[in-house]
Structures are given as structure tokens and as C-alpha cells.
Image: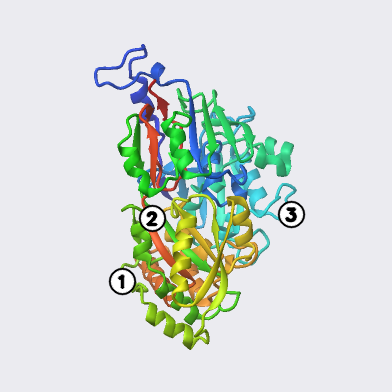
């Protein structure tokens, strides 16, 4: 057996335990444990969660909440390195097919039931088996990663078995390079079997996990309230009594709420407002490390977007650099690849579609649209990390398209409706983006561009069904050697550029803001911010 061990996070806990427990600060100025405890933090955001059942969502607004309720077997730290969570160590067989996990002991779900290997098996059976009585919903991320569901020809998992109270065995049918990364994705948070049995499909509004915070209340399109898990396995944490996720749709209204003290953290802001934040006493500008892509997808199943000449013409007609300059205030770069530059295998050699109105007109004429055409451009109404001002960016694209004779009517809808409409192909063109949930190219390419995920309800909202592209990224997924995987991913990126299913817009460094009394809030590149260490200094 080849053993790869992850260790407990005990070192950090020991350091904290060594701090003074009185109400004074230590000599270095670090707050004592007593000073860190208590209080309510209000997190202002632009849209509500879709569901609090992580296996049934793909959107960041849902995951930022569920990540504090549920825990995964492994997790990514801020450096995008895998760390232990509910699994403390693991080992694999020589052939890379059988994986054995040692699970954390002494952990309880929020309903008081025990976390153990049987609970993990219960969750996997729910996720992977369409015949399971609790398999209710789309479960979109499971087939993205595991090649379909139980019974499908390409399903990756042979078996998931409890080999001891706190020992788990997962047997795969074929080698899969990013398999461990799958276990760190927030969508695979482990839920209480008792709660699933109690609530069934209602688990999405009654979440029960092992995380630092427990679900308290949900007022749709307004607030979600979480309360401190007093029995959390990490001694002394979390510090906060409550976290409230407050929906304030308008960016300017959200900034005003931060300035007046109605919220403590602001997520999603106009890039042009960063100067206001920097010049306002009592609030601070912070930045989320870049790990996203922003783009506009064509619906390739609708005419005339089934024609590559039309897609290339529109790529040339849109002035991406002007959009980045106008709406991102120096916090983004024009994008070329569906992989962000911070991720290995990103191909820097891709030739971008330069802004060229005359060449765009020629391509449209060649496609038979010398006089242009009329279409729709769909956009979300709320800000996203990759699209801070989606309506204004859509209007800029609308203006550029008019220059080559394309009349694009903008159709805007709120977040949950927008996701539902686009995955069901109601759009012609749609503003979109992606924040990675694992540090592997597979996560950006397979969900969003594989033929496998282009059937309604689709995550591949371009309905890009290239056999060659899907073959390349599938081979890369099943190849262990990273150099070979890089070659395959770069070949796939070149093919993507030639086929042009998207207009690449930007790689962004999303700005956030917080009150200066918020301590140890550290925005995660994947946007799944844990509030375990956060405290308020007044």
C-alpha cells in the first residue's frame, strides 16, 4: 500500500489554547479567546441561495452558506492545497482503484447523531443511486464528476463500504487523477442520515451537517440565519454566535448598508466604488484571490449560433479590453482561455479574438447575415464575482453588436430563475461565469464544456457537443501523469478557441469590503468562505 497521510489541525488549536484566557490582550496584541467569542456577523450579498442541499446546487450563493453547515471528507485551504476535514488520512492500492479513509472520531451532526463511516455510505448511496428513496432532485455535480449514476455504463464508483466504525473504503472502476479533489468539493458535504430520512426533499430547507454553524432560519430573498454549533469538534470554535446572510440586490444599496453599519461584510460591489471604500473611515477594502472566469455563452442549438462564423464574428465584434477597463477598475484582465491563469495547464499561447469590426462584418456576411439579425442576450440581475455589473456589461455588448448589425434585446432575471432558464436552454446568448471549486482543470472544463453535460438540464449552457473536445478532457481525467494531462488540456483549449462556443470576457480579482472590527475574515479563492475563525473586535 502507498500511504499518504494528512494530519489534524491540532497545531493551530494548541497555539490558540496557549493564549491568555483573561480579558486582556497578550503582549503581541492578539485577542484572547474570551475576547473573540460572541456576537452576530451580517454578510451582505446580492442574491439569495437556491437551496441548502449542497448536492442539488452549483451556484456560489448556495455554497457560501452550506459550506458553514456541512463538511466534506477533505478540503482546500487558501493556497488550494488539500487538507483533512472529516477524513484524517487515506491510502490507496497499487493500482489506484481502492481507497481507504480513516474518519475523524468524536464528531456529531447538528441533530446529535453520530458521524461515522455508515453515514458517509448513506450519503454516497443517496447521491449515486437513482433508485434510492432519498435521491430527489437533479444532483447535477455527481454525474459531472463520476460519469453518471449507478447503473450507467461510465459510472466511476464500484462500491462504497464501511470497513469499520470510522474507516471507509471506496473502490473505483478506473484510475481518476482528480478523485481526491472531488471529495473536497462543497457539493459533497456529508448530511445527517437521520435528517435526510426525516425531511426527504425538504432537506434543502432544513440542512443538518457537522459544520461550525447550524441552520436556524431562512426568510426567502431576505436572510438566512446560522447559529454557533456549541458541540463543534474543533475546541473553542467557532467564535461568532450567529452569521446572517442578508440579501441586498443593488450594489450601491449594499455599500450604503456597510457604511451605516447594517452589514459587516459586503460581497459584490461596483469596481468603481473601491475608491469610496478606501477613503471611508471604519471600512476596509479586501480582495478575493482570482480563481474564476467570466464569459458569454452562445446557445449552439439555436440558429444562427450553430454557425462557427457567426460565433467568431461576435467574438471579434465585442471589445473585451474596453469592457474590462470600464467595469472592473483594474481588478480584471481580458480572458482568452476557459482555464484561469492561476491554474496549471492554462495555455498562455492561445491567440485571442482581437476587436475588429470590419472583419466581424465580413464573417457575418460570409455566414449569410450581411444585414445582421435580431436576437436576445440574457443576463442575471445580481452581481457575480466574474460580472460585478452584469446589466451594464450586457449593455456594452449590446452596443458593440449593433455596430455589426446585430440587434440584441437584453432579458434580465433574478438569480434562481436565471439558472433555471439557462440550464433549460431558453437563452440565445447568456452572460455567465464560473468560480472553481477544486484546483484541477477538470473542474472548469468538464462541467461547463463536455458533451456529457450538454443535455437539459445542462450545466454546459452553450450546448457545446464536440466529441473531440470531450474525448480530450475525458482522457486527461483518466491520466495520472500531470505533464501528459497538461498536453491534453492545452490541446482541448486550442480546440475550444477554434470552435468558439463562448466569448471569453475576464479573469477577475473580486473586491469585497468589511467593517474594520471584523477580524480574521480571509476570503477563499473558491468563494466558500468558512466563518470558523472570524470574530468581532468590539
Identify the mark at residue 349; answer none if there is no mark.
Answer: 1
Q: Residues within 10 Å of mark 3 (few under 14, many from 20)?
A: few
- Specify the quadrant of the image occupied by residue 317: bottom left
Kindly check if marks 1 and 2 are in contact, taking CB atoms under 8 A apart as contact.
no
Q: Is residue 161 visible?
A: yes
- Say which element carries label 2: helix
Q: Name the front one of labels 1 and 2.
A: 2
Front-lying residue, 251 or 445: 251
Identify the mark at residue 327; answer none if there is no mark.
Answer: 2
Tell me residue 52's x, y (percent).
Answer: 61, 42
Q: Measure the C-alpha gap from mark 2 to mark 3.
A: 48 Å
Identify the mark at residue 489; answer none if there is no mark.
Answer: none
Q: Measure the C-alpha gap from mark 1 to mark 2.
A: 26 Å
Q: Residues within 10 Å of mark 1 (few under 14, many from 20)?
A: few
- Say which element carries label 3: loop
Residue beneath the point at 39% across and 77% down? 357
Q: The C terminus is located in which quarter? A: top left
Kindly check if marks 3 and 1 are in contact, taking CB atoms under 8 A apart as contact.
no
| Marks 2 and 3, the one that precedes in the sequence | 3
Q: Measure the C-alpha gap from mark 3 to mark 1.
A: 47 Å
* Residue at the farthest top position: 22
Residue beneath the point at 41% across and 43% down? 524
Q: In the figure, 444 relative to 215: above or below?
A: below
Q: In the figure, 371 relative to 273: above or below?
A: below
Question: Dot 3 corresponds to which residue?
Answer: 131
- Say which element carries label 1: loop
Residue beneath the point at 60% across and 48% down? 55
Q: Name the front one of labels 3 and 1.
A: 1
Amino acid at each position: 500500500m502507498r500511504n499518504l497521510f494528512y494530519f489534524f489541525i491540532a497545531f493551530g488549536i494548541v497555539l490558540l489554547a496557549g493564549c491568555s484566557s483573561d480579558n486582556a490582550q497578550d503582549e503581541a496584541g492578539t485577542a484572547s479567546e474570551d475576547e473573540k467569542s460572541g456576537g452576530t456577523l451580517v454578510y451582505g450579498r446580492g442574491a439569495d441561495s437556491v437551496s441548502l442541499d449542497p448536492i442539488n446546487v452549483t451556484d456560489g450563493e448556495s455554497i457560501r452558506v452550506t459550506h458553514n453547515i456541512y463538511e466534506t471528507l477533505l478540503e482546500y485551504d487558501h493556497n488550494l492545497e488539500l487538507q483533512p476535514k472529516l477524513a484524517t488520512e487515506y491510502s490507496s492500492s497499487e493500482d489506484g482503484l481502492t481507497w481507504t479513509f480513516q474518519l475523524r472520531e468524536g464528531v456529531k451532526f447538528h441533530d446529535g447523531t453520530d458521524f461515522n463511516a455508515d453515514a458517509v455510505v448513506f450519503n454516497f448511496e443517496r447521491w449515486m443511486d437513482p433508485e434510492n428513496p432519498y435521491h430527489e432532485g437533479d444532483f447535477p455535480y455527481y454525474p459531472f464528476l463520476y460519469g453518471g449514476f449507478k447503473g450507467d455504463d461510465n459510472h466511476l464508483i464500484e462500491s462504497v463500504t464501511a470497513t469499520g466504525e470510522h474507516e471507509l473504503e471506496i473502490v473505483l472502476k478506473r484510475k481518476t487523477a482528480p478523485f481526491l479533489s472531488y471529495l473536497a468539493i462543497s457539493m459533497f458535504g456529508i448530511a445527517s442520515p437521520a435528517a435526510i430520512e426525516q425531511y426527504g426533499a425538504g432537506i434543502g430547507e432544513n440542512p443538518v451537517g457537522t459544520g461550525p454553524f447550524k441552520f436556524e432560519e431562512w426568510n426567502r430573498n431576505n436572510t438566512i440565519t446560522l447559529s454557533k454549533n456549541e458541540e463543534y469538534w474543533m475546541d473553542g470554535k467557532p467564535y461568532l454566535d450567529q452569521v446572517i446572510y442578508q440579501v441586498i440586490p443593488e450594489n450601491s444599496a449594499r455599500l450604503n448598508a456597510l457604511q451605516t453599519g447594517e452589514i459587516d461584510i459586503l460581497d459584490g460591489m461596483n469596481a468603481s466604488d473601491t475608491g469610496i471604500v478606501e477613503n471611508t473611515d471604519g471600512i476596509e477594502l479586501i480582495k478575493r484571490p482570482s480563481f474564476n472566469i467570466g464569459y458569454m455563452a452562445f446557445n449552439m442549438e439555436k440558429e444562427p449560433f450553430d454557425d462557427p462564423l457567426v460565433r467568431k464574428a461576435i467574438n471579434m465584434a465585442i471589445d473585451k479590453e474596453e469592457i474590462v477597463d470600464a467595469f472592473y477598475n483594474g481588478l480584471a484582465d481580458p480572458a482568452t482561455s476557459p482555464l484561469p491563469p492561476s491554474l496549471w495547464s492554462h495555455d498562455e499561447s492561445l491567440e485571442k479574438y482581437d476587436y475588429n469590426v470590419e472583419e466581424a462584418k465580413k464573417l457575418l456576411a460570409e455566414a449569410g447575415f450581411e444585414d445582421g439579425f435580431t436576437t436576445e442576450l440574457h443576463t442575471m440581475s445580481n452581481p457575480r464575482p466574474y460580472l460585478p455589473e452584469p446589466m451594464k456589461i450586457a449593455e456594452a455588448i449590446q452596443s458593440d453588436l449593433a455596430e455589426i448589425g446585430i440587434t440584441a434585446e437584453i432579458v434580465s432575471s433574478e438569480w434562481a430563475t436565471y439558472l433555471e432558464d439557462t440550464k433549460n436552454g431558453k437563452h440565445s446568448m447568456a452572460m455567465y461565469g464560473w468560480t472553481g471549486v477544486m484546483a484541477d482543470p477538470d473542474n472548469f472544463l468538464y462541467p461547463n464544456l463536455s458533451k456529457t453535460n450538454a443535455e437539459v438540464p445542462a450545466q454546459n449552457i452553450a450546448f457545446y457537443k464536440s466529441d473531440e473536445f470531450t474525448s480530450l478532457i475525458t482522457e486527461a481525467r483518466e491520466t495520472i501523469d500531470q505533464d501528459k494531462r497538461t498536453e491534453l488540456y492545452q490541446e482541448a483549449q486550442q480546440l475550444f478557441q477554434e470552435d468558439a462556443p463562448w466569448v471569453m470576457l475576464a479573469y477577475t480579482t473580486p473586491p469585497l469590503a468589511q467593517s474594520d472590527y471584523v477580524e480574521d475574515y480571509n476570503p477563499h479563492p473558491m468563494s466558500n468562505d468558512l466563518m470558523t475563525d472570524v470574530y468581532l473586535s468590539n
